[in-house]
Amino acid sequence: MLSIRTDSLASRTWCAMAALFWLAALAGCSKGPKPALESKPALKRLQPGKEFSGFLQDYSKLKPNTTLGDDALTYVSPDKMKSLHRYVAIIVDPVEVYVATDAEASLVPERGREAVAKYFEHALVNAVSDAFPVIEYPGPLVLRLRSAIVGIDLGGKVAPLDQPGMTTKPLERAIVLEKVGVEMELVDSETGERIAAAVDKATLGAGADVGTENFSRLDRFNEAKLAFDQWAERVREFLDSEHELTGEDAERALQSYQPYGK
């Protein structure tokens, strides 16, 4: 009887250990690949005489898109198997920052460019989140949104803050957005294949600058906030326009619509 109980206990122990290993393996598989670690926005310099920053994979297929603005260029993959219609979620990558050609990159305040990149990333998430759920992990039918702010410049020293209740210190030098443009592309999160891309080169004019890392809370930097919000909305308009069914796709969808059955 004793040997039977010992064998039974050993058997149960082995089964329990096997079950734990199986659950651990299952949990590991369910997490999927980890996203890229969050990092400070990369600071790069525009090359002299270049029309574009070099952030996108390819610029040769971009075409004017007047529905988004006179200075907008866009690309959408002609392959129906790579259509935006197929995707069900999106990852929004940290925004990259490019300094204007004639600016001294070493003088650009790190806190300021981090604030600029973070605000634009936040605006993008708000703009696209009700079109695609925003997630962190790559997977099947998941897009990755890559974006860059191109052409930030340096301004003068920032005047003391005069808004009550604000304890943040001003930046040493203002970040000027007057000639800034935006470049972005949507790629397949698993393969990296480009699905769509856009460049918005519209200049903002005087008044759009950032003088503190908490600029979104200060009225004096409203022009900068509005600029990022408008760019994010254009990205959303671009997504919406590409989600509209046209031609054969629209006709097929209309014919298949049978709210009361056959």
Image (cartoon, helix red, strand yellow):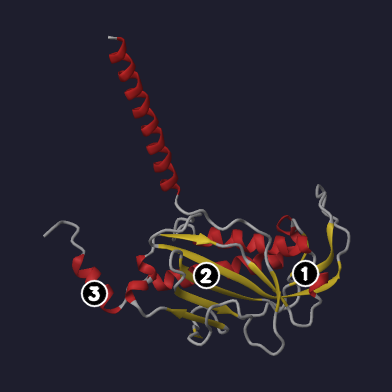
Furthest residue in direction front, as rendered = 3
Residue drawn 54% across and 59% down? Answer: 125
**Where residue 49 sits: x, y (%)?**
69, 90
Q: Nearer the viewer, residue 224 or 6?
A: 6
- Amino acid type at mark 1: Ile
Q: Nearer the viewer, residue 210 or 6?
A: 6
Pointer 1 residue: 175
The answer to whether 89 appears left or right of 258 in the picture is right
Furthest residue in direction bottom, as rendered = 49
- Amino acid type at mark 3: Glu
**Where residue 221 sits: x, y (%)?**
74, 63
Q: Which mark is residue 251?
A: 3
Residue drawn 58% across and 78% down? Answer: 200
Q: Nearer the viewer, residue 196 or 47?
A: 47
The answer to whether 83 appears left or right of 172 in the picture is left
- Residues packed near mark 3 inside 10 Å, few (<14), some (14 to 19) or many (20 plus): few
Furthest residue in direction top, as rendered = 1
The answer to whether 234 appears left or right of 257 in the picture is right
Q: Which mark is residue 47?
A: none
- Residues packed near mark 1 inside 10 Å, few (<14), some (14 to 19) or many (20 plus): many
Q: Nearer the viewer, residue 135 or 155?
A: 135
Q: CA distance from mark 2 to mark 1?
A: 23 Å
Q: Could you say which quadrant of the image residue 16 lies in? A: top left
Pointer 2 residue: 235
The reply to whether callout 2 and callout 1 are in contact (CB within 8 Å) is no
Single out the mark in the foreground, 3 or 2.
2
Q: Quadrant of the image for the C terminus?
A: bottom left
- Amino acid type at mark 2: Val
Q: CA distance from mark 3 to mark 2?
A: 27 Å
Secondary structure under the numbered disc 1 in the rendered image:
strand
